[in-house]
Image (tube, rainbow, N blue to C red):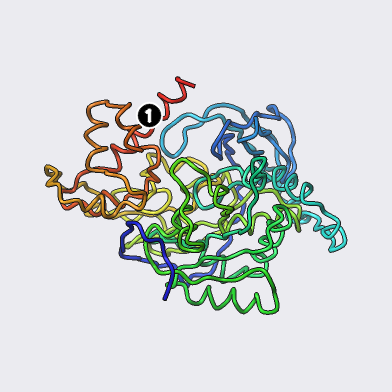
Amino acid sequence: MLKTFKKGGIHVPEYKLTAEKPIVDIPAPREVVVTFSQHIGAMAVCDVKPGDHVVKGQIIAKANGVVSANIHTPISGKVKTIGKWKTAFGYPCDTVTIVASDEDVQYDAEHGFEPRTEEEIKALTPEDIKEIVADAGVVGLGGATFPTKVKLCPPPGMHADILIINGAECEPFLTNDHALMLACPDEIIEGVKYIMRATGVNRAVIGVEDNKRDAICNLEKHLEGESGISVMPLKTKYPQGGEKQLIKAVTGKEVPNGALPISVGAIVQNVGTAYAIYRAVKLREPLISRILTVSGKHVQSPGNFRVFLGTPLKTVIEAAGGIPEDTGKIILGGPMMGKAIVSIDAPTIKGVSGVVLIPEDEARRTQENPCIRCGACVEACPMGLEPYMLMPLTENGEWEMLNEHGVRNCIECGCCAYSCPSNRPLLDFIRLGKFKVNEMMRKKS
């Protein structure tokens, strides 16, 4: 019997239109806009000035504190400007614009990163690997963008006994992790080994939903003869890829509300993150590109693409055939947890796992009706919350009561809104309430 989490969850139509599409490389643009906030935590601090010449992979903004990450240039070129640029969601963000000359393009074509030898890799200590990961600006590529080094350094007195690699990819439409598991199993496995060395963990499990049988078989084939690493097929159920839900499915342990995975001896990393760690340790390559899915029911050529960070979203969408005429909404991420964007001129950042183009007839909100107290949202919530209550508390500004009812434990999966027969925008209000409560708690601390 396939394992899964027990509390809540839903089954949604998959629309994995790009499940069999190989990864296609999008060439590096001649001009990139690189933002300094591509991670959870403090914005990185600019380390270049206009007129400077930078080389591909060079740090252009340094991590600012423990929960922050370095930012690197994906191309060689000259720093054109440093200033504000609107993100895909319309918020201003500090950025640097870099322009490549013909000579820079030629240089990048002829010069790559120098891989470490096997002897050099064997000589690395756990602390060396952690520092390499930090220097490379690696963050969680499942969407959360939490600086990876922090996860590799458990708090004093805590120790991990299992590493869980998240290959669930339960969002409809998204297949970038699926494509990566098919194309680069050896690299993912090497990345897993580096994480195990860094954390002292002797057991690793790669959790993959059963709707990706080819990926499961591919990983198992490449793990033959390996010890300590295994693949666990999981029941296809949303949100299987949620960190706490994945831990419950794999280990049977439940992470208490407000606690971290390390509290039950687990560290969770996405397959894309393991791959990025491989490239950082083996190839000396910082996180300057990522794989993402561009999809939608009417997209001409949906696919999985390797994209250099700083590439305009417009360029990424054009690689899939452009915007269909009937598009009503463009979402970064998947349709369940993603958010609609206001600009396709914004640059690609580390946290963009996908771009989904929604047709107009599906993008419009349906008529909202009064809550009928059916309890469907409560039954669907994987965190055991009461969404029907959290929404009116937010509407009425009852921040203290919202906090008491656990709004900060919401993982924003959207199960509540999806299951509501009255079409109430539960998640929208809960997100707002969660933001307000977090703001209130910061002021109190």
SS at circle 1: helix
Q: Position of residue 435 (x, y in %)?
A: 38, 32
Residue 236, image x, y percentages = 39, 68
Q: Is residue 193 above or below residue 141?
A: below
Q: Name the residue at 58% across, 48% down.
A: 262
Question: Compared with residue 206, is residue 132 higher up or lower down, i.e. above or below?
Answer: above
**327 and 223: which is toward the camera:** 223
Whole-percent x, y for residue 153 in the image: 67, 44
> In percent of the image, x 44 and y 69: which residue is there?
3
Front one among 102 and 207:
207
Judge from the rendering whether residue 209 lies leftward or rightward of residue 6; answer left or right: right
Q: Is residue 281 visible?
A: yes
Q: In which image quadrant can residue 16 be found?
A: bottom left
Q: Nearer the viewer, residue 293 or 322?
A: 293
- Residue 317 visible? The answer is no
Q: Circle 1 sits on which residue?
A: 437
Q: Which residue sits at x=52%, y=70%?
A: 232
Give, as a three-letter code, the residue at label 1.
Answer: Val
Residue 162 % position (x, y): 61, 59
- The residue lying at 68 percent from left, 33 percent from top is 62
Label 1 crowd bin: few (<14), some (14–19), many (20+), radius 10 Å: many
Rendered-image quadrant of the N terminus: bottom left
